[in-house]
Structure formats: C-alpha cells, structure tokens
Image (cartoon, rainbow, N blue to C red):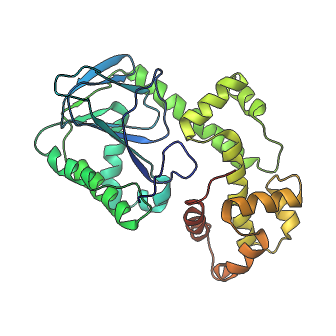
Amino acid sequence: MCQRVIANTPKFLMFDLQKVEETEHMIFGADYILIRPRTSGCTLHLANTHYRLRACQLVLLAPFNPFRLTLESNHQAGITDCDVLHFRLNALGQTFVDSVQFKTIKTMLDESKRGLLFEGIHNNTIHALLNHMENTFDFSQVLNLLGLLEKLSQLSPQRYLIDNSFEVSNIKRTETRVQMVQDYIAENLAETLSVTMLADKLHMADSTFSRFFHANLGITFRQYLIEQRVRQAARYLVSTDWTIARIGSEVGFSSLSNFNAKFKCLLRVTPREYRSSHVDMRENIESSKAIEGQLQKQLADVTVS
C-alpha cells in the first residue's frame, strides 16, 4: 500500500497529489499548487476573480496565492473530477534550487505568482506524468516530480490569471510575514516563545495568528517550534562538544528530560545516541548541509506527538 504524505501534516516534505475537496474559505498555502481538472465543472476562485476550468487544462499557483476550488454537483457527464498536486522545494536543498540546471524551472515557479494557465495538446505529457505519480517516499517519485516540472517549464502559459499588481503585492506581503516569523523563531530558539508573543509582532489576535501560521506552514506553531529546536540541537550535537544539557538549554528546552523526550519522539534516538552515530560527520565539516540532509531523511517518517 502506498504511504500517504498529506500536505497539511508535519510529514509532508516534497509533494502530495490529492483529489480536490471544496473549502468554504480561501486557502493561503505554503505550497506550490498544480491543478489538473479531469472533467469540466471545476471552478477556480483566485483572489477577486473566478475561472471555469476545462478538462486537460493545467493551472500553476505559487505559495500564498489565495484560492479555493468549487465543484458542480450535477454535472451532466458524471462526477466532477479534479486533482491538485501540492509540492515544496525546501527538501531539495537551496544549492540545488539555485543551480544552473534548475534555472528554467525556478523562472517558471517565480512567474507562477501571477497564476499560470496551460492548455493544448502539449499538456498531454504532463498529464501522463501525473498519472504515474504516487504519494510515497520512493526516490523514483522525486524524479517523477522533477521531470514533470522540467516538462512544464518548457511550455508557454496560455495566459496569466493574476494581472492586478495589488493582488501580487498582497501575496508578497503574506510571504514576507511568514518569513519574518520563521526568522524570528530561528534567531530566538533559546527564548520562551509563544503564540501570544509572535501574534503581537504581527499585530494579530492569538487565534488569528494560529490560523495564519497553520494555513501557511501546514503545521501548528507548537509542532513547528519543537521541530526547529530539535533540528538545531542535532546540528549542535554533530558540530560541537557541548554537553547534552547545554545543548538542550541553548535551543530552548526547559529541562534535560523534556529535551530527551522531544528529541527521541522526532528522531527516534536519544541525543546521546544521535551524537554517537553521527560523530563521523565532524571530519572536514564546513556547513550544516550534510546535517540537514540527514535530518530531512529522519524527519520524513516521524510526526511530532
């Protein structure tokens, strides 16, 4: 049975292909979105406009594009069918995303902030690749995603769905606010961080901030904070000779027992065991990229409790 990787859970690192489910409110997601209607009857609500999509069209949206999809319940050809592919680039690593080989894809993804609509017989190649995608952690599926993005980047969009500069500005502002929160957390892991503290910085009510955070990062604030603390602790375990207790304190855990419990919950080993099994990574280490690769692999199959 395929191992499902759902976009709104901490397990989601690369992509999630799913059937469309209607939502009452606009979605501000942290993922790139590729929409593939299989039949007519699917309507895309994007910013202040809406578009009736036809079968075999494709729509690419950037993170933080506010959208929602509605499906006609009484379609003459049967049940309205539409797929949505969520995907992120962080699991690929920044060095790869910034490489020359990825440049054409990156250019397309940058343009997707304006909402790209693709149609025509050239879409058939993309549909064929989507038909072979499965939500598993198999490396072959990563290659399928990269192949799909490469083929899509070679097509010319039929039109841009968002031409209003004000709408693009709002999307950028949301992206900036999310980045500001992530940067603040990264720079203040040792401090006592709370929803109230971050909500105040964005001038939001606690409940509004919690919804904003989860909608844009696909994870709760508490889950995200624990994961970032464990990630940083793992880097310190490999790159320093600090004691386990000091590392737990440096990343903001209130006690050694709490640090051990959360670390083992996420990485399935204790901090001491993690350090012992990764000591060979210290030799000639110049950055945290090797550590990050190991962390991505280990976190892929674990959920914060």
x, y percent for residue 197: 78, 32
In the rendered image, is residue 219 in sight?
yes
Q: Is residue 135 left or right of residue 124?
A: right
Query: Which quadrant would residue 259 be assigned to in this image?
Result: bottom right
- In the visual, does 8 lie left or right of 244? left
The residue lying furthest to the top in this view is 48
| Residue 240, position as x, y percentages in the image | 77, 72
Quadrant position of residue 9: top right
Left or right of residue 140: residue 251: right
In this rendering, would 118 be left or right of 111? left
x, y percentage for residue 164?
35, 20
Q: Choose between 187 and 83: the one closer to the eye.
A: 83
Pick whichever, 108 or 38, lies toward us.
38
Is residue 249 in view?
no
| Picture quadrant of residue 110 | top left
Q: Residue at x 82, y 63 (%)?
A: 247
Task: Identify whether 35 is placed above or below 167.
Answer: below
Q: Quadrant of the N terminus?
A: bottom left
Number of numbered markers? 0
Residue at 30% in and 52% down: 149
Q: Residue at x 65, y 44 (%)?
A: 183
Where 196 sits versus 47, above or below?
A: below
